[in-house]
Image (cartoon, helix red, strand yellow):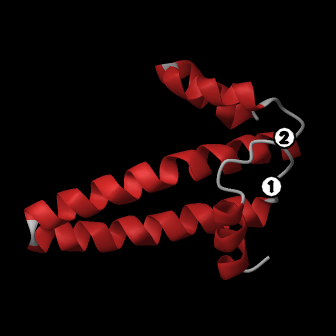
Amino acid sequence: MGPSDAVRSVLVKYADFSGRASRSEYWWWIGALFLVYIVISVVFAVSLELGALLWLVVTLGVIVPGLAVAVRRLHDTGRSGWWLLLAFIPVLNLVLLLFM
């Protein structure tokens, strides 16, 4: 799966928490978000207000598909999507995710 196919797949399955997500789908999505946030940080450096507004809009727009693709990726590794709640436990999450 290429980068455009992966991002399109994540956005089409916007709130679909069932099924599986391939490794390439997940990492291309993460890479695309990384590039978007680099652009936002450049805009932020130029215009504080516009950068903050753009950051808010993008962040609110990608929360649900980001969670959905993460849950589908966990399903692909044979784990429940509830494992994603480990992100709220500060040190334990890093240790467990490194061993997974």
Q: In the displayed structure, does residue 79 sit left or right of residue 7?
A: right
* Residue occupying image coordinates x 81% and y 29%: 80
Kindly state the secondary structure of the residue where label 2 is placed: helix
Query: Are dots 1 and 2 in contact, CB under 8 Å?
Result: yes
Q: Amino acid at mark 2?
A: His
Sort mark 1 into few (<14), some (14-19) or many (20+) by Cα contacts within 10 Å.
Answer: many
Q: Quadrant of the C terminus?
A: top right
Residue 50 — which label? none
Q: Amino acid at mark 1?
A: Ala
> What residue is pinned by disc 1?
21
x, y percentage for residue 39?
Answer: 32, 74
x, y percentage for residue 57?
Answer: 34, 57
Is residue 71 depicted above or below 54 in this figure? above
Q: Which one is nearer the viewer's eye here, 12 or 2?
A: 12
* Residue occupying image coordinates x 41% and y 70%: 36
* Residue occupying image coordinates x 67% and y 36%: 98
Residue 75 — which label? 2
Q: Of all residues shown, which one is farthest toward the right? A: 78
How far separated are the C-alphas under marks 1 and 2? 8 Å
Kindly state the secondary structure of the residue where label 1 is placed: loop
x, y percentage for residue 46?
Answer: 10, 74
Q: Quadrant of residue 50?
A: bottom left
